Each structure stands twice: as C-alpha cells, then as structure tokens.
Image (cartoon, rainbow, N blue to C red):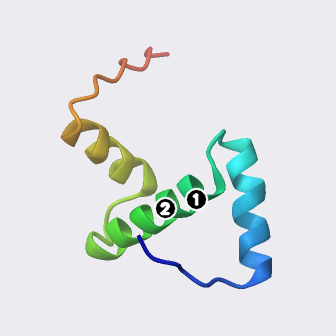
Amino acid sequence: MGIVKINDELHEEVRRASTVMCRSINAQAEFWMKIGMLAEASPTLSFNDIVKTQFSAAHVRLAEAASA
C-alpha cells in the first residue's frame, strides 16, 4: 500500500463525496481512481456503462428496469 498526495481542496471533495456515498474516504478515492482508469481505457463508454461492465464482471445480477 502506498501514499497518494492530493491537494487539500480535492481531499475535502473526496471527504464530502464519501459521506454521501457511505464509503470511507479511502474507498471513495479508490473508486474514483478505478472509474477514471477504466474511462481512460474505454473512452466511448459512459459512467453507467462502466459500472454495468464491472457488475457483470463480478457476476452481480441487476434488476431489470420497469418499462414505462
């Protein structure tokens, strides 16, 4: 495990987001880094597409959205 240096303003944003998302500050930062890495590797995918791909890779079943 290493240490990542980020500026105080970004750290505060991570802290706020972690509260909303019910994650630790480290888990929130890790989530953002992972999503960012995946987005750079697949620039045509949306955030939702990336998350769906990750759920699928983890064999998580997603409920089908009800059609209107």
Give percent across and percent down for residue 17: 71, 54
* 59 to the left or right of 22: left
| Residue at the (34%, 24%) spot, across then down | 62
| Residue at the (49%, 61%) spot, across then down | 30
**Badge 1 element:** helix
Give percent across and percent down for residue 43: 33, 72
| Residue at the (28%, 28%) spot, across then down | 60
Number of residues whose C-alpha sits closer than 10 Å to that of mark 2, classed few (under 14), some (14–19) or many (20 or more): few
When the figure is inspected, residue 52 is found, relative to residue 17, above or below; the finding is above
Q: Which residue is mark 2?
A: 30
The three-letter code of the residue at mark 2 reads: Glu
**Badge 2 element:** helix
Q: Observer-nearest residue: 22 or 36?
A: 22
* 40 to the left or right of 33: left
Instruction: Please tell me in which quadrant of the rendered image residue 16 appears.
Output: bottom right
| Disc ID at residue 38 | none
Query: Circles 1 and 2: CB distance less than 8 Å?
Result: yes
Spatial CA distance of label 1 from label 2 is 6 Å
Number of residues whose C-alpha sits closer than 10 Å to that of mark 1, classed few (under 14), some (14–19) or many (20 or more): few
The three-letter code of the residue at mark 1 reads: Asn
Instruction: Please tell me in which quadrant of the rendered image residue 34 appears.
Output: bottom left
When the figure is inspected, residue 5 is found, relative to residue 46, above or below; the finding is below
Q: Residue furthest front?
A: 1
Q: Observer-nearest residue: 66 or 6?
A: 6
Q: Which residue is mark 1?
A: 26
